[in-house]
Amino acid sequence: MINYCSSYHMSSMPRILSRCHFTAGNIKLLNTTGKPRPNFKEYQRRFFMTHTYVELLSKNIHSGTDLIKPYLRTCLTGTTQDDSLKNEEFAVSFIGTGGGSPGRHRNSSCTALRLGGQTYLFDAGEGTQRQLAHTRILPLSINKIFITQMHGDHVFGLVPLILKIQSAAKAQLDESLAARRRGRGRRVLDRLPLLEIYGPPGLYNFINMSIALSCSKINYLDMHIIELVGGRNGLGPTALSRKKSVFLQRYPEIDTPGIRRVFLEANEDQVWIIDKPGVVVREVLQHSGIYQLANDVNLGKNRRLFIKAAELDRLGGIQTFGYTVEEQTPPRNIDAKKATELGVNPSDKYNLLKMGESVPTDDGTGVVKPEQVLLEELRARKLAVLSDHRRVPPPMAGLCRNADLLVHEATLTKEDGVDKIKIRGHNTAENAGIFGGEMGCEVVALNHFASKAISEEVIESLLAEARHGNRNRSQIISSYDFMEVWIPRGGFNFYNLPLNSSKDKGK
């Protein structure tokens, strides 16, 4: 871990290092005499000097966070986590929590949803690639990227990140080929990794133009750029003028092999359905005598989720989207103790019970029905991410309802007033609290902070505004770079720990 003085800017790193004392795994600032500074309050900080796991767990971090503390951790590499829960992972990592441009304390916008082997990214502002290099998120785990708007603080890190993912894919292929040549029989990849990028019209032209003019190529990725068309501001700021719109225009000169352009239309409710898993059928698959659930895709690397998008009211001509990701309802767990007492020991029969099928007892003298041994149903987890906006239209508000975690911008303060909200197209911490409470969200994470939101006094003030608007209907937290919120299977359970999860009760 690295200890920095928060008053130093990252551009002063060479000067800082010349006055540092190196110990095993630590850097401590020295005074001009070469001795450790007296009375120097050391924070465990990482690069952009934001809060880390140690500070988040300290008693002095923020008032009113006792219930959410057990679910807060860091996504920094080298830190420990419970790998036994990886298969059911649903963790939200804050990679960049600032607004505008990167600063000393916060990087530009980027939020990650880690799903136990696959990662979804929301926005990729400047410096995202560097931030990710210090986390547990591997480049090849990123298979979907969702862009909320085409402003630079949300996309200027996207193309470098794409090339980084491609570099990792090439390295994996080279390693596979080398292993095969050494006679180790390692199978060569039969297809290129798929990277899907969703966002407003203009995303395809932005990426392709950047790749073309930087003399780059896409040779080791299968990229699909899906533009959400048909919205209110889909033609961009030139829609009302006589200028030719560049957002949906096709420029053959910049077309890149390996990148496919797809248009996705909204449904009649003005909602874009990005992914919708198939219906779970009541069919038992039998392979080698082992019964399996027909479509238990809630866990594991290849699970599919309900992913939807809708427009936010930003500013005229700036199309902005919010996104929600929700898993399928998990299969109900078995009360193993009760099932054993009724004559069914742990076996493949448990999967039949989970699917609603009655099973004979092990001695064949009776029948056990599902309602006798099934525990209460686990709630599906949901994440809602709202980017810059001045109002949340009804379609997007409906998607946010009952989210476990709502990530909401807090660029402005209550003092800025309604007029500034309308002019700048941003929102306040108080409105974040109000909206989260009205939508029944369990946790509201304030995000996208202005450059003035540096001191703890300012953060505490924003939290107070949000809690006042929320009226204690949600847990309110402030996001920091490299902070992570772990959402347990079945959702948060603030008032009845331990959780009713598969690890605690069922099998």
Image (cartoon, helix red, strand yellow):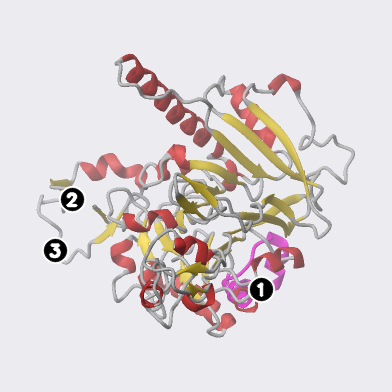
What secondary structure predominates along the stretch shown in magenta?
A: helix
Q: Where 450 sits versus 247, above or below? A: below
Which amino acid type corresponds to the residue marked 1 in the rendered image? Gly
| Residues shaded magenta | 413-434
- On the image, the x and y values in percent for residue 259 come to 64, 28
Residue highlighted by disc 1: 417
In the displayed structure, would residue 289 be above or below residue 65?
A: above
Toward the viewer: 101 or 139? 139
Check if residue 446 falls in the magenta segment.
Answer: no
Q: Position of residue 156 (x, y in %)?
A: 56, 40
The tag earlier along the polypeptide, 2 or 1, is: 2
Label whose residue precedes the other's in the sequence (1 or 3):
3
* 50 left or right, relative to 225: left
Q: Is 36 situated left or right of 443 in this image?
A: left
- Tell me residue 95's x, y (percent): 45, 52
Q: Position of residue 212 (x, y in %)?
A: 62, 22
* Furthest residue in direction bottom, as rendered: 471
Query: In the shown orientation, is residue 210 left or right of residue 243?
Result: left
Q: Which mark is residue 38?
A: 3
Q: Which quadrant holds the C terminus?
A: bottom left
